[in-house]
Image (cartoon, grey):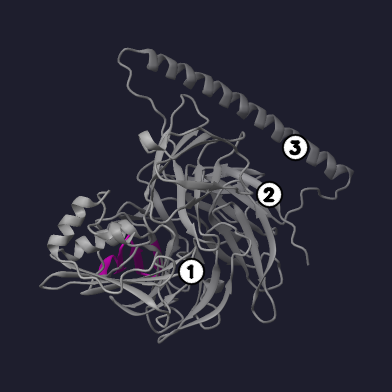
Amino acid sequence: MDLNLNRADYLQMGVTSPKTMKLLPASRHRATQKVVIGDHDGVVMCFGMKKGEAVAVFKTLPGQKIARLELGGVLNTPQEKIFIAAGSEIRGFTKRGKQFLSFETNLTESIKAMHISGSDLFLSASYIYNHYCDCKDQHYYLSGDKINDVICLPVERLPRITPVLACQDRVLRVLQGSDVIYETEVPGPPTVLALHNGNGGDSGEDLLYGTSDGKLGLIQITTSKPIHKWEIRNEKKRGGILCVDSFDIVGDGVKDLLVGRDDGLVEVYSFDNANEPVLRFDQMLSESITSIQGGCIGKDGYDEIVVSTYSGWVTGLTTEPIHKESGPGEELKINQEMQNKISSLRVELEQLQYKVLQEREKYQQSSQSSKAKSAVPSVSINDKFTLNKDDASYSLILEVQTAIDNVLIQSDVPIDLLDVDKNSAVVSFSSCDSESNDNFLLATYRCQANTTRLELKIRSIEGQYGTLQAYVTPRIQPKTCQALQYLIKPLSLHQRTHFIDHDRPMNTLTLTGQFSFAEVHSWVVFCLPEVPEKPPAGECVTFYFQNTFLDTQLESTYSKGLGPGIIHLQEEKKRHPLPQFLIVDQGDLGREEKASRTSGPPNLDMWL
């Protein structure tokens, strides 16, 4: 059975964060549903479709940026209450738009992820997880790395409350109360979690995860250990996964898996007889997919996939056919409806053109006034700088809410720009004088019209470190530019892992001296990527890394103590052997620091 879906754009909000769009439950089977969405302007809007037009049910006033939107309600009843996370506050609305809850969590960080189950509220900021019940604090956990998402196994199906945290260090942490029961490694940094089939599958313990490098998997979270069921590798080098949902869009009685990626790809996976996912449909949109839902929006009886994009567009991929078979009378009616729609669009276009002229004149007058203030427009940029394990290169993805005019790339460290198939921009290089001004690269990408997303590939040289800068100029008036900086670290091609082969021969470097635990951690952060900025909890810390280019291993161990600090590094013997054993006292550290050519960590430049 072929799956044919037709695109329909409904409306546009402001810039949206992942998981900020939901569909309210339908009143009856396959009846049209309402869409609720929140954006970075702090606006929450609920709308439905009527005669092909979006009709607002309610719309709130602007406020703080909305980071998450979830539906909730009493367990085993329709989840119709709307909850949003903005800053450190949780607000609740009814489906008619009446606010019934305003809960200030007093978290020191802004809320990044949220999950609601009955009267239980699960929140996470960058490193902090909190569990509330009836707005009363229950449990707390401080993570060693950034938390990207949080979810809880269905409490109505299981006799326990089991929250799961998706952390940046490629680990899912399973909690009980304030303690970690166990951790399980996944093949990439997990960005999104979802219950399989929306209810945890047959066991209630099945959990879907998507990673920032485009991998998708299913894992069963039991009380004692995880069970990995299947995993989809990203062999076609598609974008990272931002959102997933379960909905029977094929119509065979089995829920399909809907996936939205940060390169604009929408995918539908069905399940075969062995419960393995099989790709049934994919379609590329022009910008990243921040939310995805399955339901019925445009017309009764026609299922569709509803997505929200980074710039705020709400778009449907519907099963409703574009060209309908009809008799002469119905054809006349359809033509009349089309004429009315075209007339209303023309009127709306004229109103928008007049409004643009008014605003342009107002801006000219205000900018020429002697009391004029700076009127630089603010443009949101969504950027991602990640290391690809497969080809040992960095991907720099820049996404702007409006069209990009050009991007200037500058680097004070030698790097190579690699070709990207999906990149249609024209690149030009300028000559650089690296000896006098430490400028090794100057390249300009000129984008075609309506390009809102640009992907670059960069390969660095280990041992040389510095800063890569991207100057992004949107296609707007007046001309403005935003500068973005990315650190290229000394061991830039090393990627974090959780296991290494201890049977391989290793070189060892040990440093001792009167330095603190925090100082040692700052050196490791300086040298290696994917290390959390905050020092981890505990008396002893070990990090494992793998070189994506040479496939060598690196182990870094350091511990707290009353006496001198100790840092212990081991690397596999390959290419540049390290001394087998080296002890350096504080005086030697000081002398080496003076001789160092950089202001980096004491004595580590010799090793690099």
Q: Nearer the viewer, mark 1 or mark 3?
A: 1
Residue matched to label 1 = 551
Residue matched to label 3 = 338
Estimate how packed mark 2 is, as few (under 14), some (14 to 19) or many (20 or more) residues with alpha carbons within 10 Å.
Answer: some
The mark that comes first in sequence, 2 or 1, is 2
Estimate how packed mark 1 is, as few (under 14), some (14 to 19) or many (20 or more) residues with alpha carbons within 10 Å.
Answer: some
x and y percentages locating residue 351 in the rendered image: 58, 25
The residues colored magenta run: 114-137
Q: Secondary structure at mark 1?
A: loop
Label 1 and label 3: CA atoms lie apart by 61 Å
Residue matched to label 2 = 7
Q: Nearer the viewer, residue 48 or 598?
A: 598
User: Which residue appears at 45% of the width and 42% of the height?
Assistant: 381
Q: Are marks 1 and 3 in contact (CB under 8 Å)?
A: no
539 lies left or right of 350? left
x and y percentages locating residue 109 in the rendered image: 28, 55
The mark that comes first in sequence, 1 or 3, is 3
Asked if the stretch drawn in magenta spans residue 115, the answer is yes
